[in-house]
Image: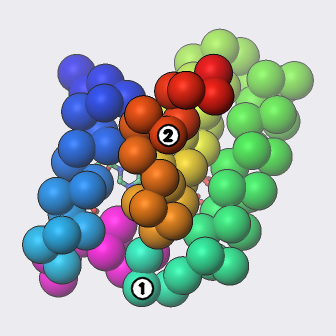
Amino acid sequence: MKTFESLYAELSAKAASGAEDSLTVDELKKGTHFIGKKILEEAGETWTAAEYEGAARTAEEMSQLIYHLQVMMIQKGISLEDLYKNL
Ligand SMILES: N=c1c2ncn([C@@H]3O[C@H](COP(=O)(O)OP(=O)(O)OP(=O)(O)O)[C@@H](O)[C@H]3O)c2ncn1[C@@H]1O[C@H](COP(=O)(O)O)[C@@H](O)[C@H]1O
């Protein structure tokens, strides 16, 4: 099972490697505007799931939101420490 930290490390490694089969690498190439739209999309889907679809579906959408947030972190050079100091 992955954690927030292990996923961030995995995505950072994917970004550094430029792996051609990586959706993360693809998304980073599409840039900030695209990633931002995904964050909005997944945030909305999280809200909808929370209203109408139960905990399991909400957790699934939250996981996708966290993923795209992490892609944006990497895109903008934001470290875990940069994030944690603001929590
Ligand atoms: N956790 C995720 C993850 N969550 C979401 N996504 C991306 O988001 C897509 C699914 O959500 P979308 O909204 O785009 O697609 P959808 O079918 O509309 O799904 P819903 O929005 O309806 O829920 C996937 O096709 C991925 O592009 C993810 N892609 C990757 N990961 C993790 O990142 C790791 C690295 O992935 P790669 O970079 O592709 O190797 C993987 O091992 C996973 O653990």
Q: Is residue 22 found inside the magenta-colored segment of the image?
A: yes
Between 60 and 74, the one lying in front of the other is 74
Q: What is the CA distance from the residue labelled 2 to the residue labelled 1?
A: 23 Å
Residue 65 visible in image: yes
Q: Amino acid at mark 2?
A: Asp
Determine which residue is flagged by label 1.
29
Q: Residue at x 73, y 36 (%)?
A: 46
Q: Is residue 82 found inside the magenta-colored segment of the image?
A: no
Residue 29's spot in the image, x, y percent? 42, 85
Between 38 and 48, the one lying in front of the other is 38
Q: Residue at x 63, y 28 (%)?
A: 86
Magenta span: 19-27
Q: Is 10 positioned to the left or the right of 72 in the image?
A: left
Check disc 2: other Cα within 10 Å, few if <14, some if 14-19, many if 20+: few
**Quadrant where the image shows the N terminus:** top left
Seen in the picture, residue 70 relative to 50 is either above or below; the reply is: below
Q: Residue furthest top?
A: 55
Q: Is 10 positioned to the left or the right of 63 in the image?
A: left
Q: Is 80 positioned to the left or the right of 14 in the image?
A: right
